Amino acid sequence: MVDTRIILSGLWVAVMLIYLLGDVLRIFAGDFESGKIAGGFQPTQGLWLLIAVIMLVPIVMVVLNLILSYPAIRWVNIIVTILVVVFNIVSLPYKGAYDNFLIIVSFVFNALTVWYAWQWMA
């Protein structure tokens, strides 16, 4: 049986790659203006920093799954996953069908993350 920590880390890697795939497809589809977000809005450096912090969440969760002790990491996974899902729901719907599809797939991985963390017995 694979350690739950590895499964949870893998799920966070999958979520991160889904987000990156959406960004790459958005570039190739031409659904953005260079240096701008949300239909032409020019972000400040502070907003770019906030975006970087948000995009770091899955990466940080991979590391935390490997180093934090049980049961703390169990609850961190559940809470952070719920916050990520709420953040993504607020952003719906996206312009492209591919983006909406990818976010739904990420919700499936998020649900698996909560399920594995909830079922986790040390």
Image: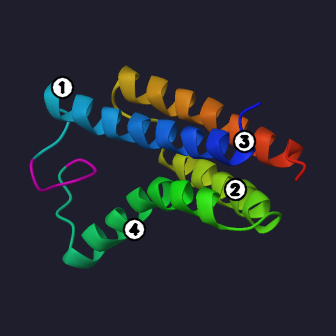
Which residue extends farthest bottom? 46
Label 1 belongs to which residue? 29
Label 2 belongs to which residue? 77
Name the residue type under label 1.
Answer: Ala
Name the residue type under label 3.
Answer: Asp
Marks 4 and 3 sit apart, C-alpha to C-alpha, by 28 Å
Query: Does residue 72 lie above or below 13 as drawn?
Result: below
Circle 2: element type: helix
Give coordinates of residue 3: x percent, y percent.
72, 41
Circle 1: element type: helix
Query: Does residue 70 lie above or below 116 as drawn?
Result: below
Label 3 belongs to which residue? 3
- Residue closest to the eye, 25 or 60: 60
Name the residue type under label 4.
Answer: Val
The mark nearer the N terminus, 2 or 3, is: 3
Residue shown at the point (85%, 47%) measured from the top left:
118
Marks 1 and 4 sit apart, C-alpha to C-alpha, by 25 Å
Q: Are marks 2 and 3 in contact (CB under 8 Å)?
A: no
Q: Determine whether, in the image, residue 14 is placed left or right of residue 32.
A: right
Query: Looking at the magenta stretch, what is its main secondary structure?
Result: loop
